[in-house]
Image (tube, coloured by chain):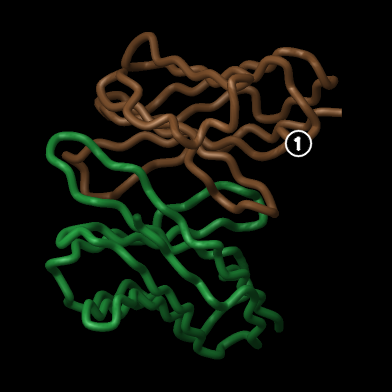
Chain colours: A green, B brown
C-alpha cells in the first residue's frame, strides 16, 4: 500500500524567511510519480510539480525548489524568501505509474503554512 | 481550456434528501477521480474511472454513495439518503497519462447536510 507522511502539521514563518516542507513516502512500486499541490484559503487545489521516480534531479521554479531523494524516500519542498501569498495548505501526493491511463493519487495530510509580515 | 467543471459550488440539504454532484472533466482526459476532503480524514479517494469504467470504488463509504460516468465528458456522484456526516468538500479531478502536468482538480462542491 502507498503512504505519504507530512509530519509538519503547521508552520509559521515571517515574510522573506526560507521554509522547507517535508514529505516522506512509502511504496512497493519501483516506478511512481510524486506531486505537490497547493490549497490556498479559497479552497482550490493547485498543481505545483510532478516528478518521476527515475528522475532524481532537483528542480527549481522561481522561489520554489524540490529535493527528491530516493534513498530516504523523501520529496521535500522549499520556498525561498517566503511571501504572504504563499500562505496555504500544501499537500504531497504519490501515484503509481501505469500505461495509458492515470492511477489514483494518495495524499499526505498536508502542511499549513502561515507567512506573516 | 475551461478546466474541470464541478456543480454546484455549494449545496445545503436536509438529512435524508438525495444529493447529486456533477463533474465535467477536461476534454481528452481519460481518467476521472472523486475525492472527499474533511478535517478529520483529509483528502480521500472515493472512486475513479478509466475510460468511463469504474476501476476502484473501495473508498466509497457505503451503499448510500454511488457514482456514474455515462460518457467521457460527464460524471455524477450521488448520495441517497444524505446524512450530516457526509458534509465535506467533494473534488473531482481528471488526468491523462499523456500529459505532464498531473491531475487537474475542479473547484470542489461544498456540501452541508443539516
Q: In this view, does B20 lie to the left or right of A56?
A: right
Rendered-image quadrant of the C terminus of chain A: bottom right
Q: In this view, does A71 lie to the left or right of B2?
A: left
Crowding at mark 1 (Cα within 10 Å: few <14, some 14-19, many 20+)? few
- Residue B11: percent from left, percent from top: 74, 25
> Which residue corresponds to the image point at 59% horizontal and 27% vertical from the top-left?
B62
* Residue plotted at (43% across, 30% down): B57
Q: Mark 1 lies on which chain?
A: B
Q: Position of residue A32 (x, y in %)?
A: 22, 58
Residue that lies at the very extreme toward the bottom in this rendered image: A17
Q: Can see residue B112?
A: yes
Task: Give the residue at mark 1.
Answer: B85
Residue A68, relative to residue A18: is it above or below?
A: above
Is B60 left, or right, of B103 in this rendering? Answer: right
Q: State the image quarter where residue B82 is shown.
A: top right
Q: In this view, does B33 lie above or below A28?
A: above
* Label 1 secondary element: helix
Quadrant where the N terminus of chain A sits is: bottom left
Is residue B3 in view from this perspective? no
Q: Where is residue B91 in the image (x, y as percent from the top left)?
A: 54, 37
Q: Please determine whether, in this image, residue B53 is positioned above or below residue A103.
A: above
State the residue at coordinates (46%, 56%). Answer: A107
In x, y percent, where is residue A39?
Answer: 56, 56
Residue at 54% across / 21% down in the picture? B77
Question: Toward which corner of the image does residue A83 lie, by quadrant?
Answer: bottom right
Amino acid at each position: 500500500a502507498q503512504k505519504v507522511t507530512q509530519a509538519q502539521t503547521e508552520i509559521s514563518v515571517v515574510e522573506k524567511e526560507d521554509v522547507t516542507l517535508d514529505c516522506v513516502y512509502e511504496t512497493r512500486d519501483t516506478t511512481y510519480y510524486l506531486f505537490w499541490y497547493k490549497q490556498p484559503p479559497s479552497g482550490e487545489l493547485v498543481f505545483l510539480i510532478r516528478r518521476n521516480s527515475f528522475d532524481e534531479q532537483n528542480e527549481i521554479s522561481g522561489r520554489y525548489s524540490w529535493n527528491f531523494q530516493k534513498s530516504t524516500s523523501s520529496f521535500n519542498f522549499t520556498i525561498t524568501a517566503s511571501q504572504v501569498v504563499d500562505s496555504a495548505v500544501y499537500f504531497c501526493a504519490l501515484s503509481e505509474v501505469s500505461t495509458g491511463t492515470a492511477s489514483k493519487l494518495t495524499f499526505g495530510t498536508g502542511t499549513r503554512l502561515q507567512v506573516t509580515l | 481550456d475551461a478546466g474541470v467543471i464541478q456543480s454546484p459550488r455549494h449545496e445545503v440539504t436536509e438529512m435524508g434528501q438525495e444529493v447529486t454532484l456533477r463533474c465535467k472533466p477536461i476534454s481528452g482526459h481519460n481518467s476521472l477521480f472523486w475525492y472527499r476532503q474533511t478535517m478529520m480524514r483529509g483528502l480521500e479517494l472515493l472512486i475513479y474511472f478509466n475510460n468511463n469504467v469504474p476501476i476502484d470504488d473501495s473508498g466509497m463509504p457505503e451503499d448510500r454513495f454511488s457514482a456514474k460516468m455515462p460518457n467521457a465528458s460527464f460524471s455524477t456522484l450521488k448520495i441517497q439518503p444524505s446524512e450530516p456526516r457526509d458534509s465535506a468538500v467533494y473534488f473531482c479531478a481528471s488526468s491523462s497519462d499523456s500529459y505532464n502536468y498531473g491531475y487537474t482538480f475542479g473547484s470542489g462542491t461544498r456540501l452541508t447536510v443539516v
